[in-house]
Amino acid sequence: MKRILTLLLCMAMLLSGCAGMTDSQDAAPVGQKGDVWETIEEAYIYAFPLVLMDATRISATNTEEAVPGKAPVNQFMHGKALANAQFKNVVSPNVDTIYSQVWYDLSEEPMVYVLPETDRFCKVQVLDAWTNTVAVIDQAGAYAITRSSWSGEVPDEVTCIDVPTDMAWSITRTVLSGEADLPNVYAIQEEMKLMPLSAYLSKEAYQPPEGSYKEENNFVPIDKILSMDPFTFFSKANALMENNPPSAADAEMLEKLAAVCVGPGMEFDASVLTGDIQANWQEMLLDLRPKLAAEGMKFSNRLGQWSYFGAPIGDFSTEYTYRALVAIAGLGANTVEVALYPKTEKDADGNPLTGEKSYMLHFESYPQVLDGGFWSITAYGDDDFLIDNPMDRYCINDRSGLKVNGDGSVDVILSKDAPADTTNWLPVGDGSFHLYMRIYTPDMDAINTWIAPIITVIE
């Protein structure tokens, strides 16, 4: 880090402004130290999702061929197994669905995604480079994932999905009912097709090219971003904005960020930084997460003793701080029309949930979903990973075959030790834990009046 800062300071003496700007784009004067670092923080928050998306793409496509968890660009990365307690790739893993992901480079031509008919929830979320959801595909057919500036034509049977950036990401979520249902999901994956538009038009068999592997690209994306110095981070952000342009709604923000040399076509200039660069940068990063969390509370919605992040999650417009928070907490989050993710870490009395006690999770009724929707509740330890247990049971859901009480309600036991009848048991280990409810295709009108499940201590 010291060597990097020395290089930055040497460059600062050589550079006098933001290269790449015309006379009318001269950097606005920046006043006191506080003003500079306040603007730098805004620039970091603004650009963070874009830079994180790029790092995630680099890591996920760092392979010569498709393997579990990785695939070359413009190729399917099919999940093959449900997460368990040994899975540590991402926090709060989903155990309801199998993912099929693609990282797209749309700079040359559109990619055609053929989604087959299925007998279950199977939706394709398409995101741009800024983590905004541009489309959710839920009908079988052929779809051209297309850079919005592309001017070609597609056949009548192909639906265009316009993406405003060269980089795009699709996440296909296919629901399943436990391990025994995996072969059925594999069959659906086999029928998914992906190819360049030219290959689709030629009708010839398409063989995707081999990818490449570089040891330096074998990193954890979030760790990679948080280790960047200011010059590396903002230089990367500026370069990415060239082919992944900000939206028209960002004009006011970009005008402000020009004062610190952040924006498409600019070269970040370390001379805008003041004071002890390393100390100020590290202090900014340390202070950022609580600031993001506090800002995110504006978008938190209560559901009984649960809470979830609401709109505009997944399609953020100019809510830059919220966008950065969600990128850190759950990159690729759905919009509320597709899924809600209520969370609770306390019981009905407001006390933290702990495996030292046993609890009753009481449903008056199940979550309200539209046709084809589903729900689940998953337990996670305080490390945000699944909790090891002898039954390898990590969630209960609408496919669990839960026993129903005489009045139509349902009681689920949350405990470390198994009860005599394990049908309605969700293991929680012996430490602190929290629960995530996932409600896919929620009935938003009904959800507003629905009584969410209540957690009480079993005396």
Image (tube, rainbow, N blue to C red):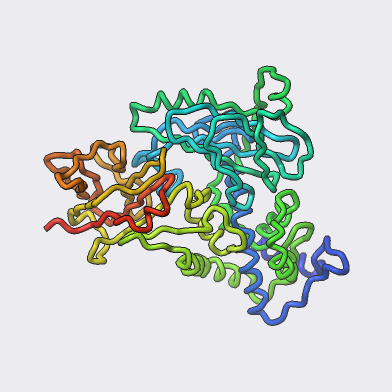
Residue at point 53% right, 48% down? 332
State whether residue 241 is above or below residue 17.
Answer: above
Query: Whole-percent x and y of residue 385?
Result: 37, 48
The residue at the far right in this view is 23
Query: Whole-percent x and y of residue 378?
Result: 33, 47
Q: Is residue 343 left or right of residue 28?
A: left
Query: Whole-percent x and y of residue 153?
Result: 76, 33
Residue at point 19% right, 56% down? 356
Q: Is residue 397 left or right of residue 116?
A: left
Q: Nearer the viewer, residue 9 or 447?
A: 447
Q: Is residue 117 left or right of residue 421?
A: right
Q: Quadrant of residue 201?
A: top right
- Quarter the C terminus occupies: bottom left
Can residue 446 be spotted in the picture? yes
Q: Nearer the viewer, residue 369 or 163?
A: 369
Question: Total label count?
Answer: 0
Query: Whole-percent x and y of residue 61?
Result: 60, 37
